[in-house]
Structures are given as C-alpha cells and as structure tokens.
C-alpha cells in the first residue's frame, strides 16, 4: 500500500451528477480482506468487485458533503456510505449514501452502532436469529463492532447470552460494560467443546457467528433442536491459504438447524427503523458503545490488519478529519 | 445381525395400552445408519436413542393392526409408523402410528411417497426451499426415495431442475420418467464444479441435499444470492471414520444463503395436508413412483447396506408379508 498525495478540485466536475464527500471517519471492517483476493468477475454468483491495484480501495465512512449536483444532497450534509481510503471521494452513485439523522450523537457512531455493523447486529440477530425470550445465545468475537451490540440486543430481547473474546480485558468488558451473563477467553480454553458444555448445559438456541472455523464446528455439536446460526462473518478464515474443513455440519439435519449467511445490503430496507430504534437505545443507556479510534490516514492499513489478530478493543475506526469539519 | 425366531401371543398383554401390528413392508432409510453409532445419551442435544444391541432395531414400516387396547385403533386398521425389524411389533406408544387413508393406492407407498420420504420431499422442498417459479433447482441422489419426488415437485412448482445420480440407468430414469430438465452421472464427471457451471450457468437457487460432503462444497460455490440449501441427509458421510471437511461454507455470507437441516418429525403437523395433496398428484399422474422392493426379512440388512453404495434404484423397501394380510 502507498499513500498518494495529489491536488484535486473541491467541485463536482461539470456535467456529472455526483457528490463530493470529505471523509471524516473511515471504518475498518473484516469484509475488506475478501476484496483483496482474486475472484472470477465473469462468475455471475460473485457479488462485489475485487479491489483494483492502483486505485483507492473502497471502505465505509462518515463524511460531509462539500459539493453536490445530485438533487438529494447539498453542501454541509452529513452522510455515511461507501467511499474510498482517501480524504475526499467523488461519489458517482450518491444513492448509496445515507444521510445522518442523529447528529446529536457522535458522528463516528455511523461507522459502527448506527452504521453497517449496527444494522448487521440488529437485522442479523432479529431477522435471522429470530430470538425468543429465554433463548440461550452464544456470540463469538463478542467485544467487536457487531458482537458487542448483539450481546446487548440479546439482553434487551430477554435471552441468556455468553460471549467469547481473545483477551481477559475483552472478557471483562463483556461482563461489566455490555451486560453479558457470562464470557470466556477462547485463547485460554484448551477444549472449546467442554467450555461450551459448561456455559450451555442445555445447549445453544442461537449462535451469532463472526469467526467460522473450529469455533463453528464446536458450536454445531452443542446446538439445540430448531437452533439458528446467524453467520455475519468468518474472520478466522479470511487469511488462510486453505480454509478450515468443517466436519460437524451434519448436526443440522437431526436437530433441524438453520444456518444463514447475512450481508447487510440485503437489509437496507429496515435501516430507517433500525436507526431510530438504536438511537433510542443509546440515549436510554440500554446500549453502550466501545470504539477503538486511531488517527490519520497513515494508520488505516495497520488498523485493518489488526482486526485479524484481535488487536482492536471494540469498533475499529480511523479518524482522518474529525477536527477539520469546515 | 441375526434373525431370531420366537413364538409370541398375538394379543396385547393384559393391562397394557398398546397396539399389536403385523408388519407388511419395512422401509430402508439412511437415517438408520446413525442409530448404529455411539452417542452420548446424557447429552440433551441428542435427538434419538442409539439402537440397543440385542434388541430388534427400529424402522419405519407399513402394517396391519392385529389387536389393540388403544381407543384410536382397532384390529384390521392399516397403519404406518415406527416399528421394529420384525414380523410383529407391540407398539407401546400408538400415538406415533398414522392410519392409512388412501387404501386404494399401493400400501407400500406409505413407506415412500406417502410416508416419511414423501413428507421429507414435500415439506423440506416447500417449507425450507421456498421455491419460486423459474428457480434453478439442483437435486442430489435424485433417483432415490426423496430425490425423485423433489424433482417432480419442483417441476409442478415451475422450476428448472437438474438431478445427479450414480449410474446411467438412474440418469435415464430422471430424464424420461421423472421429468427432470437435465441430469448427470456424478461418477463419470471428473470436475463437479465445472459440471454444475455447465448445468447452471446463472447459478443455483435451491439445492436439495441428501449427500453432503464434496458435492455440497462444490454446490456452495455455484449458489446464487439469496439461495436456499435444504439438507435432508448427508449419505456420503455416514460411513466415514472422519467426515469430509467442508471448506466453502463462507460463501453463505456474501450471498446471504440459508442452509437448513430437515427432520421430518418437526413437520408432522403438515402430514394430513401433504397426504391429500400427494395422493392427488399420484392419481393425476403428476407424480410417478419407482420402488426397489426386496422380499423377506432375511433381505433387510443387505437392502439397508445397499443404500450407501447406491445399489437401489428408487425407494428401497422390504416386503415381508404382502401376501399374508389375513
């Protein structure tokens, strides 16, 4: 990766319908790793294009509209959506941008709790997980951007929720700050199957999976009849040459388990409802947010890489112009 | 296994509420293999008990009530349900037996098209697969008891359906007798991924899985966004010491795919509707049935074992008293 310095005009070029956005916060998300792998673009089943070497990579961000020739946006609007790893982005498909309604809350929240990770936690847990009061819920990567919210939503829904994380500091956060009923450090447990049996003697109704691999395999054995596995990520797998070979999927037959993948763009139709509901939870103190903020675009690559070894504590984001909002 | 010859009284013992059934047809089904493996019975997530060495193994069958002390059954009733690999079974939980309503159809159909495999095909395809007109449907083990029905139901639902089977004879059956749009012999295809791409250039909407393993892995790569994988069995896996390690499950995230296991006892509430609808399809010639019938209880073990190498052509069953219905 390299930082390229250039001079641009802060106007939408004449004749184009576009929006020029000044990026304030860049979100670091595990999905970005997948865009760095080679896919067959002619395959109609491949969803998103690979990153193109030599071009600015895309990311989700929070920004401010500097100039617009699109009727829905005017200079000064605060927005979130898909832009580039850069200070300014000319957004050619402004329909993909969302206006920020709750400017009274920290703007950075729109990279997390009020943005894609928040919508993922909310829609994936409620629409895919279909929780019932009293359900036993397990959340992996539980202190991360999505996991911390799923745990708190599970408590709001009246579930019993246990989380796993990769350090004692994170485990402590889960129990003291996010209200998980129990939590464990998966790095210090030698037998994950035994740990899950101890935490869930009657089995698991909902597994919210962000990690995949051996964790998913162990969870499959411990699921209850009619259980739901909501898969929003498999972060343990993205850097492997050869993915982990999952051996226990057969469990889904006799127990009639549903395993469902989640991609947030399929659920943008619930975004407006989600944004209002989540903003209320935050204001009422029912949902607490922990962010891991680094400063400056130079920090962006390391912040992304850190996600894959669990360096971040909470939602990872990069502030690139938070004080320069003119 | 051994055949034990004994003399029993053809009456329900005094003081018991039970039904004595004369078994006419024994169904051979892949699930029976799982009951021969050792499970931890104290584990609350294990559904069904293991077979007990020294006792008659259980199976689904069609039979005739010889004696009954249960108010819902009288001598002469034709029933299907869980009995033993034996000529007569004393059923202590008669609630598990279903009366046969369509005695004008071959009784053996209640081991297949009108019994558990039929309900599995119907409920799993419609309730889990949720087909829409024009969907692209792939069916593995397509000439078997369940697959042959799924393919025909998919055609009734207006889908495009391709099946795989393990011999040219079976492939021919799929195309000429069951109305599949296309079919292939998986044993003569060297690259399953390429075969699936050729059969489904735009991808697969619904995969009806009875085999699991490498087939499922190849299908995952070829699924379309929002696809559904209805899993009613993984017959390729049941005899393996170490199950196949599935590497492509990550595909379910970006494509928002649902993978759902199916166990027919969860769907007994739709049985009455299913029985009427399927009986109509059979009478109208919209559903054709192929059975593989062997005779005599001595043939029962080999008939079960044959399922795992695909020896059967169509629904495998054992006629043990079809001519002795007095």
Image (cartoon, coloured by chain):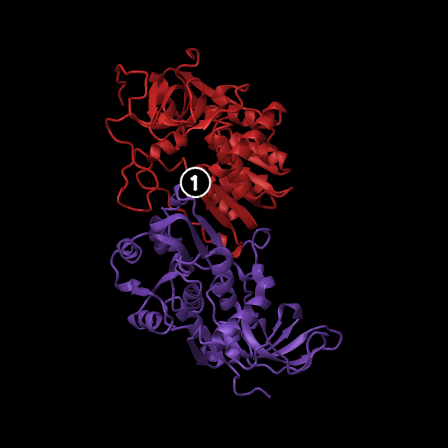
Chain colours: A purple, B red
**Residue designated by label 1:** B212
Q: Residue at x 63, y 68 (%)?
A: A96
Which residue in the rendered view is the most extreme toward the right?
A15
Q: A18 or B276: nearer the eye?
A: B276
Horizontally, is A27 left or right of B295 in the view? right
Horizontally, is B103 left or right of B21 in the view? right
Q: Quadrant of the C terminus of chain A?
A: bottom right
| Numbered disc total | 1
For residue B276, say whether it is visible: yes
Q: Residue at x 52, y 61 (%)?
A: A123
> Which quadrant holds residue B40?
top left
Q: Position of residue A213 (x, y in %)?
A: 37, 55
Chain to which mark 1 belongs: B
Q: Position of residue B157 (x, y in %)?
A: 62, 37
Q: B191 or A183: nearer the eye?
A: A183
Task: Say what secondary structure mark 1 lies in.
Answer: loop
Q: Is residue A131 above or below residue A119?
A: above
Q: Position of residue B287 (x, y in %)?
A: 59, 27
For residue A58, say whether it is visible: no
Q: Residue at x 48, y 23 (%)?
A: B313
Q: Residue at x 39, y 41 (%)?
A: A254
Q: Position of residue B128 (x, y in %)?
A: 52, 43
Q: Is residue B178 above or below residue B258?
A: above
Q: A120 or B59: nearer the eye?
A: B59
């Amino acid at each position: 990766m390299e930082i390229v310095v250039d001079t641009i005009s802060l106007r939408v070029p004449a004749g184009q319908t576009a929006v020029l956005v000044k990026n304030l916060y860049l979100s670091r998300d595990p999905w970005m790793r997948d865009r760095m792998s080679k896919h067959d673009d002619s395959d109609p089943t491949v969803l998103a294009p690979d990153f193109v070497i030599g071009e600015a990579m895309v990311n989700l961000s929070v920004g401010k509209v500097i100039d617009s020739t699109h009727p829905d946006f005017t200079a000064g609007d605060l927005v979130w959506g898909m832009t580039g790893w850069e200070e300014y982005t000319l957004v050619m498909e402004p329909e993909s941008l969302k206006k920020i309604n709750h400017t009274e809350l920290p703007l950075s929240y729109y990279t997390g709790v009020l943005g894609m990770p928040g919508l993922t936690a909310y829609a994936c847990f409620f629409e895919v997980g279909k929780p019932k009061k009293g359900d036993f819920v397990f959340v992996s990567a539980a202190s991360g951007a999505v996991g911390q919210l799923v745990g708190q939503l599970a408590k709001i829904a009246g579930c019993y929720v246990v989380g796993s994380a990769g350090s004692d500091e994170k485990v402590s956060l889960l129990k003291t700050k996010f209200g998980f009923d129990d939590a464990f450090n998966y790095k210090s447990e030698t037998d994950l199957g035994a740990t899950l049996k101890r935490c869930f003697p009657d089995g698991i109704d909902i597994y919210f999976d962000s990690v995949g691999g051996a964790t998913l395999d162990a969870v499959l054995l411990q699921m209850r009849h009619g259980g739901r596995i909501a898969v929003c990520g498999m972060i343990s797998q993205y850097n492997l040459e050869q993915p982990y070979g999952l051996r226990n999927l057969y469990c889904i037959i006799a127990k009639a388990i549903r395993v469902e993948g989640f991609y947030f763009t399929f659920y943008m139709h619930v975004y407006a409802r989600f944004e209002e509901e989540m903003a209320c939870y935050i204001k009422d103190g029912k949902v607490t947010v922990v962010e891991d903020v680094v400063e400056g675009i130079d920090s962006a690559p390391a912040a992304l890489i850190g996600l894959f070894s669990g360096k971040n504590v909470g939602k990872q984001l990069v502030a690139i112009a938070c004080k320069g909002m003119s």
